[in-house]
Amino acid sequence: MCPATWSSCGPRLAGGDGLARELTREEKRAIRALVTKWCANYDRECGCLPLDCECYMLGKCWTGAYCRYFREAVLPLDPALEVSLLTEGPRPDFKPCPICGGAVPADGRMAYCSESCARIALRRQKRDYMRKKRR
């Protein structure tokens, strides 16, 4: 039993018969960044404060069981990571945002990851149009 999630650790999904998949390098890096920056239960010196041990999420290699606080409070800060971790089966495809490189769902409807990136792109398009028109 895992002390952080009270479920079985390993390659089986908690509550299902399917197998969990291994996390990608980018997902591991994103989890580590979220935990060290935003998790209120994490301390650099002590690790996980409620459990008084090393943080379970920093050594995570498989999808499936997650720290409850991480899943409910920290993971929603990165919606693309949340979708990729909480959906069963293969990781959904994301395309990079042409402005900042962030994750954009590849459903064909969104071109940019946020409104601010869309405004930046529109401003660039207008600038290029005016430059072309002046020539």
Image (tube, rainbow, N blue to C red):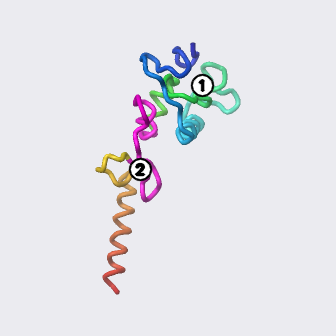
Tag 1: residue type?
Tyr
Residue 34 versus residue 12: which sits nearer the camera? 12
Which residue is found at the position 36% from the left and 74% from the top? 128
Looking at the image, residue 1 sits to the left or right of residue 113; the answer is right
Tag 2: residue type?
Lys
Q: Residue 72, image x and y in percent?
A: 45, 27
Residue furthest to the bottom? 135
Mark 2 lies on a secondary structure that is: strand
Q: Which residue is mark 1?
A: 56
Looking at the image, residue 25 sits to the left or right of residue 130; the answer is right
- In the displayed structure, 39 sits above or below 114; it is above
Marks 2 and 1 close (CB-CB < 8 Å): no
Q: Residue 101, image x and y in percent?
A: 47, 54
- In the displayed structure, 109 sits above or below 10; it is below
Q: Check the picture and name the quadrant holding the N terminus.
A: top right
Q: Residue 85, image x and y in percent?
A: 45, 32
Which residue is found at the position 43% from the left and 37% from the top? 91
Q: Is residue 80 magenta?
A: yes
Segment colored magenta = 78-104
Q: Earlier in the sequence, mark 2 or mark 1?
A: 1
Q: Is residue 14 magenta?
A: no
Q: Residue 44, image x and y in percent?
A: 67, 33
Q: Which residue is mark 2?
A: 95
Residue 34 versus residue 61: which sits nearer the camera? 61
Which residue is found at the position 34% from the left and 69% from the top? 125
